[in-house]
Amino acid sequence: MVNFAQTDEQAVYDSTVPYMDNNYHTHSIIAEWFVFILWAGLCFESMFTRYIWPIVVERQAFWTRLTPLHLFPSDLLFYGPIFLISIFVVLRGRRYGYKTSRGIWLVIILLVLGAIQAIHGLMAGSTGKFWLSDYKQMVLGSIFVPFFCVLAPRIRVWKLAERFCRIGVVLAIYNGVRGALILVGGMERYAIFAPHFSGEYILLLMYAFVLIRSIVTGKASKLILAALAFGIILPLSKPALSAFVSIHPIAFITIWMFGKRIGFLVRLRSVKMMVITGLLITVIMAWLLTLGQGEAKRHLAKRFLKTGEYYQQRDLSGGRFGAYRWAILKWTEYPVFGTGFGIYMPVRTWHKNEDEAIPVHNLPLQILYETGLIGFIICFTTFFIWLRRIYIFFKTYPDISEQWPLLGMFTWAMTMIISALIGQTLGIVQIGFMFWICVAFLSNAEAQHYMTSLYEGYGGEEEINTNSYESGVVC
């Protein structure tokens, strides 16, 4: 079996190249830096969302006037030049031995279903451009999955993750300092240069990389982990804090799920990292509560316990339970085909005393009432087909410790999906693009491993598990 070691500059660390070729596959510096610059750009944009958004809304820059829509720079970049590049790259395809079509129908199904429901919502009287917003936020980003699947074999994923985490340390410290300034009164919480929780979501991907790597390889990165935790926790954003708490059990479940293939030592390290991260969070929170004469405690009480004048009109769910009931009732009115995209719940805001349409902040319920039972079944069948394939990939890969970046992406992607149960997580522009890029890298690795399994069996338990590919649905 070919050994794709990190130290070989001519070999791709992502050893998903079909073994039938029996030689190394050189990486592309251009492809690596291209994806890295995209990731870095999405990270910087998310960090300064509060500064960029007023420019977008008020059309203060020339690029905001290129379209009649309110688009971030990343929107213009992805749906402009990158989309054109992706058409060329995908049509050009890969060399012999690479699987390019596995899973492509899953993407096409999502895009077609979304287009039908967008038209349905427009005809049903969707307010404003919410029908287009839903289509863009929920499914349109998947159009770039084939493009990044083609690029993925030319990229050393471990190198990409390490570079990304290096800039993450600096940005995390910067973000944490901004959060500390808010607590001590040096910055307004909603000032244009204040943190935005989308930035913490991106930092969370870096945190997943470092956490998973520390567990499966034993390469301790405690200072980097502490710096990233500092940047995620200090701004005290409720969505980011909830995701930060969620990512730990997801990471440890993922490790233990595949720990049998890695060995007892990795499981032991996972327990050790549980203790270390617990102590780390305790120390940061203890210091945090001393800032601003208890400002952190008051803010957390407002956000989680709904204290204060503004939150007196809401329950502990922030009004989500009422939104969920509305979504279920809406589905009973249109149970088969749904309402179409862009049908939001009307709410009379007490502070403005006017009607406002808001999403229900629960992705499964939104899919259910907007696309009906048919769309719901299609979407979740597609998701579970993909999830099953990724599970088999991790379960049957010869040395899963090599794939720590992919384990990190998987952990982060699952955390974002869990977060979408209580918010519009995947609807955030930068998070959506990062999510689909991670899906593409995971899908590529699974497809190449699947091709390998067709030509070489691993024997024993692996051979039995690999044969389960044959019984799966192939799109």
Image: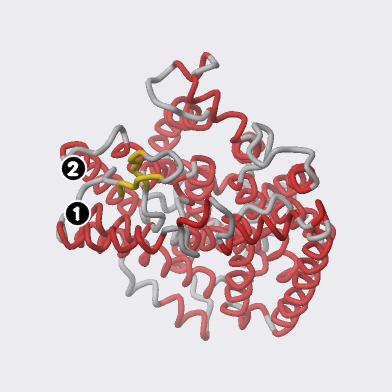
Q: Are marks 2 and 1 in contact (CB under 8 Å)?
A: yes
**Element on which disc 1 rests:** loop
Residue, disc 1: 338
Q: Quadrant of residue 230?
A: bottom right
Nearer the observer, 45 or 354? 354
What is the quadrant of the N terminus in the image?
A: bottom right
Say which amino acid is labelled 1. Answer: Gly
Residue located at (67% from left, 63% from top): 3
Separation of marks 2 and 1 at Cα, in angstroms: 9 Å
**Residue 120: which numbered mark, if any?**
2
What is the quadrant of the C terminus in the image?
A: bottom left
**Element on which disc 2 rests:** helix
Q: Dot 2: within a 10 Å radius of its alpha carbon, few (fewer than 14), some, or many (20 or more) residues?
A: many
**Residue 265 rendering spot, x and y as whole percentages:** 74, 82
Say which amino acid is labelled 2. Answer: His
Nearer the observer, 396 or 200? 200
Q: Dot 1: within a 10 Å radius of its alpha carbon, few (fewer than 14), some, or many (20 or more) residues?
A: many
Q: Is residue 75 left or right of residue 39?
A: left
Q: Is residue 249 left or right of residue 141?
A: right
Vertical placement of residue 374 versus 55, above or below: below
**Residue 318 rendering spot, x and y as whole percentages:** 47, 58
Residue located at (37% from left, 56% from top): 102
Residue 138 in view (yes/no)? yes
